[in-house]
Amino acid sequence: METNTKKEGLLNLSLFLLMFLLTAVPLLFPNRRELIASELFLPYGFIVEFFVIVPVYLFKFQKKEGFGVGNFTIMQFIMFFALILIIQFVIPKVLFNTGEVVVSHQQISLPLYTLILTQISYILMVPVYEEIAIRGGLFGALTVFSNSKIFSALVTSLIFSLLHTQYSGFKPFFLLYLISLTLVAARVLSKGLLLPVLLHVFMNGIVVNGHYLFGH
C-alpha cells in the first residue's frame, strides 16, 4: 500500500515537473530573438505546454481522484471569484495604498495576430494546463507525501508565486500567493479541477485586459 501511495505521489509530481521542463522549450526555438521582440515568445511557449500537458492529462490523469470535473454550484463560483477580485483590487488599496492593478499583463499596441494569440493563450490555455499541473499534480503529490492539505496548499502557493517570474517585488508575489490559496481551496471544495480552471480563466481575462478595463 505504501509503495502504491508513493507511486501515486510521484506520478502526480511528474505532471508538474513536465510543465516546469516545458517552460524551457521556447529557448530552443531558432528564431527566439525575433519571437521575444515581437511579443510572441511567451504565447508560443504557452501553446507548447498546453498541447503537451492536456493530452497527457486526458490519457493518464482525468479519472484520478481530484483530477476530474468535480462538483460545485454557481454560488460557490461567485463567492470564490469575488474573493479573487478582493485580492486583486481591495487588498492592494488597503495594504499597499495603491489603486493600481498590481498583477497585470500590459499589451499596448500589439499587432492583431499577436493580440489574438496573447488573448487565447493567456486566458484559455494557461489556466487549463496550470491548474492541471499545479493544483492537480503538485498539490496532489504534496498531499500524498505529507498527508496534510494545509501544508500542501501553503507550499503549492509558494511555488506558484515563484514561478511567475514576469512579476517582481513583494506585492505581486503576495497577491499571487493569496490567489493560489483561493484556487487550492476551490479545488479541495469541489473535489476537482473545473472550478479552479474557470476561476483562473476569468481572473486571467482581467489580468490580460487590465489596461483596457482600468486604463493603467
Image (cartoon, helix red, strand yellow):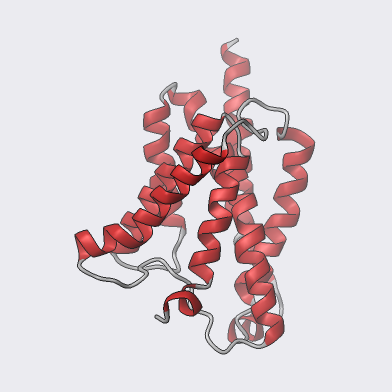
Q: Is there any visible trace of residue 43 in the rendered image? A: yes
Q: Is there any visible trace of residue 27 in the rendered image? A: no
Q: Nearer the viewer, residue 28 or 22?
A: 22
Q: For residue 95, which quarter of the picture?
A: bottom left
Q: Residue at x 54, y 50 (%)?
A: 199
Classify 106 as above or below 19: below
The C terminus is located in which quarter?
bottom left
Hey, which residue is sitting farthest top in the picture? 1
Total labels drawn: 0
Residue 213 placement (x, y as % from top left): 48, 75
Q: Residue at x 47, y 73 (%)?
A: 210
Q: Residue at x 55, y 57 (%)?
A: 202
Residue 2 placement (x, y as % from top left): 56, 13
The N terminus is located in which quarter?
top right
Q: Nearer the viewer, residue 75 or 191?
A: 75
Left or right: residue 108 versus residue 68 is left
Classify 9 as above or below 207: above
Residue 97 placement (x, y as % from top left): 20, 68
Hey, which residue is sitting farthest front in the picture? 75
Residue 127 placement (x, y as % from top left): 59, 54
Q: Residue at x 72, y 82 (%)?
A: 113
Classify 149 as above or below 164: above
Classify 97 as above or below 175: below
Left or right: residue 129 versus residue 95 is right
